[in-house]
Image (cartoon, rainbow, N blue to C red):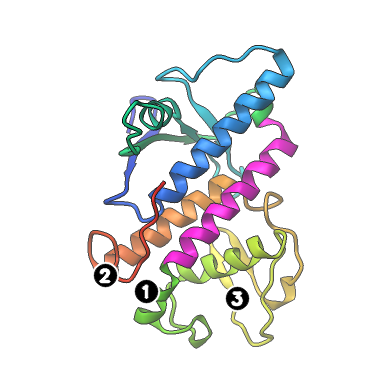
Amino acid sequence: MTPNGCIEIEYTEADNGFFPELVRLVISMSAIGIGFELHKTGIVKPYGPGQPMVLEGKQGVSGLEIHFFPAPLYGRLLSPTGRQPRFIRIIKKQVSKSPAEHPIKLGNVQLMMARLAGDAFVSYYERHVDVVESIWGKEKNGNWPSEWDFGWAMRNACAHNGLISIRRKDHPGVIWKNLKYGYADNDRQVLFDEITGVELILLMEEMDVKLRQTVGSGVPPKCAKLRP
């Protein structure tokens, strides 16, 4: 934890199953940010070593914003040897009330970012669901950990244009933080309205911790390894 109460984290491929998805997500989002800035100002500079790209979460859900630092990723990917990123450094902090000084923080742009995060989330989920089912059975059996059960609902929402899709009338519903969804919430718009890219990243983190606590450290067996 930094002196001002922020939490600084480094994600790596060895310790975080969602690392390949997060690398692709950060590169994609930062490139979009550069494009918007270029269009707005006609001038764009490379990301500096300490220059963050900020995603803002929902005040009433995570209450956090995540600061990513794309420069080291670009540096490795664009090096003569084309090296793959080894880590991603982020800072988690309470959502600030500062104005949207950069186009990437505008609401409609943040919606685009949430959908990109949704694509990353679905990729992580699908790469690991076979291992989850080998441990806890099918989701319909009702034995999944709450993090993965909520992840199942978010995976369905991401695949249905951001809408809740729980089709079994007898489904007990899913809960994460202060969010709860069930059959009665079908077709409710949740992506970005109630869940942003920040919440999806935090949920992936919790899902991955639960899975690794169960199967041990390292990449879980049977999980397909993707390159960033």
Q: Position of residue 228 (x, y in %)?
A: 41, 46
Labelled pair 2, 1 in contact (Cβ < 8 Å): yes
The tag on residue 215 is 2
Q: Is residue 45 or residue 17 the one in the foreground?
A: 45
Label 3, on which residue? 173
Circle 1 packing at 10 Å, graded few (<14), some (14-19), many (20+), is some
Which region shows up in magenta? 105-127
Q: Is residue 156 above or below residue 88?
A: below
Circle 3 packing at 10 Å, graded few (<14), some (14-19), many (20+), is some
Label 1, on which residue? 131
Q: Is residue 85 above or below residue 121?
A: above
Q: Residue at x 60, y 15 (%)?
A: 44
Q: Residue at x 57, y 31 (%)?
A: 31
Q: Position of residue 206 (x, y in %)?
A: 41, 57
Considering every residue shown, the one lying at the far left of the view is 217
Marks 3/1: CA–CA distance: 22 Å
Residue 176 is at least partly visible in this image = yes
Under circle 3, the secondary element is loop
